[in-house]
Amino acid sequence: MSKRRKRLSARGLPTVVKVIVSEEDMRDGERRCCRSCPIALALSRSIGETAEVLDGVAHLVNNNATYILPRSAKAYIRRFDEGRTRYDAPRWFVARLF
């Protein structure tokens, strides 16, 4: 059984993060709120630091770092902010350090 090591950047952040979006994230998420949408809540929990999601990228508030979000997460945020959906977020996605 092989164990994968987390690859860390020079700042000590993971270069790739698997983000799991929970039912609570979808329920508690706020529309048009960059720190409280379901994707921002899930990413913040996964990294352990507050994230702001804007224009398909996630900026870490206390660390000058940016994660690129996949197309499925971007599309969900757009639908969520428009009020067209709440509970069809991708169950998980991979964010990559930019």
Image (tube, rainbow, N blue to C red):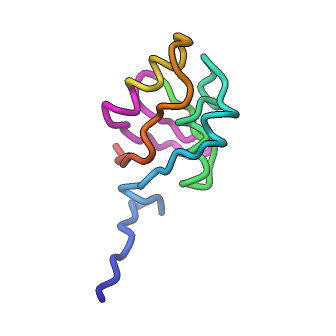
Q: Which quadrant of the figure contains the N terminus?
A: bottom left
Report the residue at 47% width, 31% height from top: 88
Would residue 4 appear left or right of 37 to someone viewing this image? left
Q: Per the image, is 56 magenta?
A: yes
Quarter where residue 10 is shown? bottom left
Q: Is residue 29 above or below residue 2?
A: above
Identify the magenta region. 55-74
Q: Is residue 96 above or below residue 36?
A: below
Q: Where residue 98 appears, x then y in whole percent?
A: 34, 43
Quarter where residue 73 is shown? top left
Report the residue at 60% width, 35% height from top: 26
Q: Where residue 75 appears, x then y in whole percent?
A: 38, 23
Would residue 30 appear left or right of 66 to someone viewing this image? right
Q: Nearer the viewer, residue 33 or 31?
A: 31
Q: Per the image, is 96 magenta?
A: no
Report the residue at 60% width, 29% height from top: 37
Would residue 1 appear left or right of 21 to someone viewing this image? left
Q: Where residue 80 appears, x then y in whole percent?
A: 52, 20
Quarter where residue 91 is shown? top left
Report the residue at 52% width, 10% height from top: 82
